[in-house]
Image (tube, grey):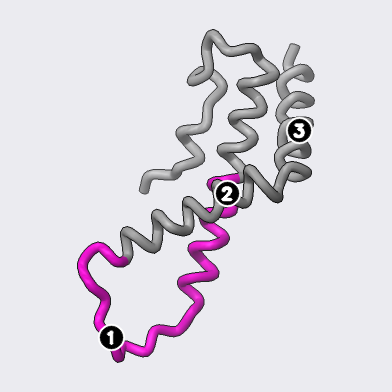
Amino acid sequence: MFSPISTINLSNFNGMPQKEAIHEVSVQFVSILFSQIFDQMENGIQKSGLVPEQMGEGWYREWLMDMYAQNATKNDLNGLVKTVEMELTKANYSKR
């Protein structure tokens, strides 16, 4: 199974200053984390079956949860992003 976290890698940000690259990776990580949280919350809602799901509706809901997560990360989760940045910076500098 494909994990979206496996796509997060500092080597994808070659040419970018390290501090900016760590920030981008942190934002991506928090966004993916909250996308999965929102998806699990949405899956916890009991479906009545009264109205059958249309083709593409599941894909749209998944996309919408991703958009909610990205928006929340940019606007409300700066503290968590900073914490992830600090942890990545510690891990990065402790290897040297």
Residue at (51, 66) in percent of width and height: 40
Q: Label 2: which residue?
A: 71
Q: On the image, which quarter does residue 85 sit in?
A: top right
Residue at (49, 70) in percent of width and height: 42
Q: Position of residue 33 (x, y in %)?
A: 58, 50
Q: CA distance from mark 1 to mark 2?
A: 29 Å
Tag 2–tag 3 contact (CB < 8 Å)? no
Q: Residues within 10 Å of mark 1 (few under 14, many from 20)?
A: few
40 falls in the magenta region:
yes
Q: Label 3: which residue?
A: 87
Please, what secondary structure does the residue beneath circle 3 have?
helix
Disc on the earlier residue, 1 or 3: 1
Q: Label 1: which residue?
A: 51
Q: Residues within 10 Å of mark 2 (few under 14, many from 20)?
A: few
Q: Position of residue 44 (x, y in %)?
A: 50, 76
Q: Quadrant of the image for the C terminus? A: top right
Disc on the earlier residue, 1 or 2: 1
Q: Amino acid at mark 1?
A: Val
Q: Amino acid at mark 2?
A: Asn
Region rendered in magenta: 31-57
Q: Nearer the viewer, residue 75 or 26?
A: 75
Q: CA distance from mark 2 to mark 3?
A: 23 Å
Please, what secondary structure does the residue beneath circle 1 have?
loop
Q: On the image, which quarter does residue 29 sit in?
A: top right
Residue at (70, 50) in percent of width and height: 76
